[in-house]
Amino acid sequence: MPFVFKSIKMIQLYKYCILSFIAICLSVAANAQTDQDGLMMNKDLFCTGIVYNASNWNKYWEGKNHRENLNLGTVSSRSVNLMGNYGIKDNLNFLFNVPYVSNNVSAGTLHAMSGLQDASAWLKWMPIEKEVKNGYVSIYLLGGASTPLSDYIVDYLPVAIGLKSNTLSGRLMVDYQAGNFTITASETYTVRGNTRLERNSYYTTSAIISNQVDMPNTNTVSLRSGYRSNWLIAEMILSDTKTLGGFDITKNNMPFPSNRMNATTIAANLKYEIQKVPGLSLVGGASQVIKGRNIGQSTGFYSGIFYILNLQTKEKKKQTTNVSTEKN
């Protein structure tokens, strides 16, 4: 689920493994990242690990109406994510995420649901990395896709574990670092395919005789900034997601997959590399939805553990070590 990479020709390889969460590295000078930050995994390095996420909410927005629902109580979500990142090249990475999700409510008649949700994969390319006065500017282009991994039921939000829609995403990201200060801005557009209900008719703003639901696309703008060093990263994140279409939850009714689901979220990420244990890093974070529409006002936390495998040949490993030593 988060540190800056600069080409080996510019500076020594860093000892990071960040997928926005906890990382463990294997006796190689390296770094890693999520699909949302300004970092790259070095060529022939593979980072994989597990991230645990937890979130809860007892208030939500029904359209613009901020309210409670005693038939739901507190809605809780837990997920365990298998994540990975492989350095195809120093400036081209492949990332993936496979989540297992469990949702529950503390009141009412809805039953807990759990299972494999939607696998996602990204290609992350850094075509431009340029030294400017007092720092570096990097530009990233990303393409991603996701698909459901199981035939879960989508018709019982908010306990349904996902929206069961195939997606395609494109992202432009710009990262700037000056000393230990960093700022990263990005915009992501996601095209969502139809989802399928377990019934043959439904009502949105009109009656529809079908089990296929046309899902609106989404757009997300994100800004993150903070401190980066070889052993400590601390950053704040502000993101805003808008659904480009859809409709509001009708009064006292259940959410529907094609609702307009907007959210403004603030978050904090922290990574600390234990210097006495080379490559061992601890990362944690928290998030809070501060404004929304047809979405829960959730508070979330995460942590995880990762491990980097050096897939370079012995000759390449020796060359990498020599270059790193010369830079020191």
Image (cartoon, helix red, strand yellow):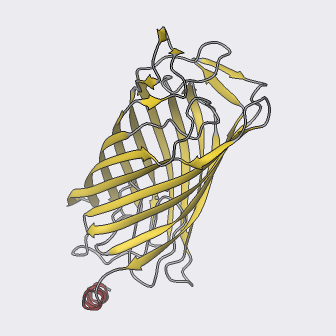
Placement of 262 over or under 113, stated as above or below: above
Placement of 275 over or under 4, stated as above or below: below
Q: Is residue 202 left or right of residue 187?
A: right
> Which residue, as the protein is rendered here, is positioned at the far front?
200
Q: Is residue 310 left or right of residue 300?
A: left
Q: Is residue 252 left or right of residue 17?
A: right
Q: Residue at point 58% right, 18% down?
A: 249
Residue 84, by quadrant, is bottom left
Placement of 281 over or under 132, stated as above or below: below
> Which residue, as the protein is rendered here, is positioned at the far top?
206
Q: Nearer the viewer, residue 3 or 197?
A: 197
Tell me residue 211's x, y (percent). Answer: 47, 23
Placement of 54 over or under 15, stated as above or below: above
Residue 97, by quadrant, is bottom left
Count the labels in the image: 0
Q: Nearer the viewer, residue 41 or 110?
A: 110
Tell me residue 125's x, y (percent). Answer: 25, 57
Q: Is residue 165 visible?
A: yes
Tell me residue 53's x, y (percent). Answer: 61, 53
Q: Residue at point 75% right, 35% down?
A: 74
Tell me residue 304's x, y (percent). Answer: 58, 63
Q: Nearer the viewer, residue 12 or 254?
A: 254
- The C terminus is located in which quarter? bottom left
Q: Residue at point 40% right, 26% down?
A: 216
Q: Is residue 36 visible?
A: no
Q: Nearer the viewer, residue 165 or 190?
A: 165
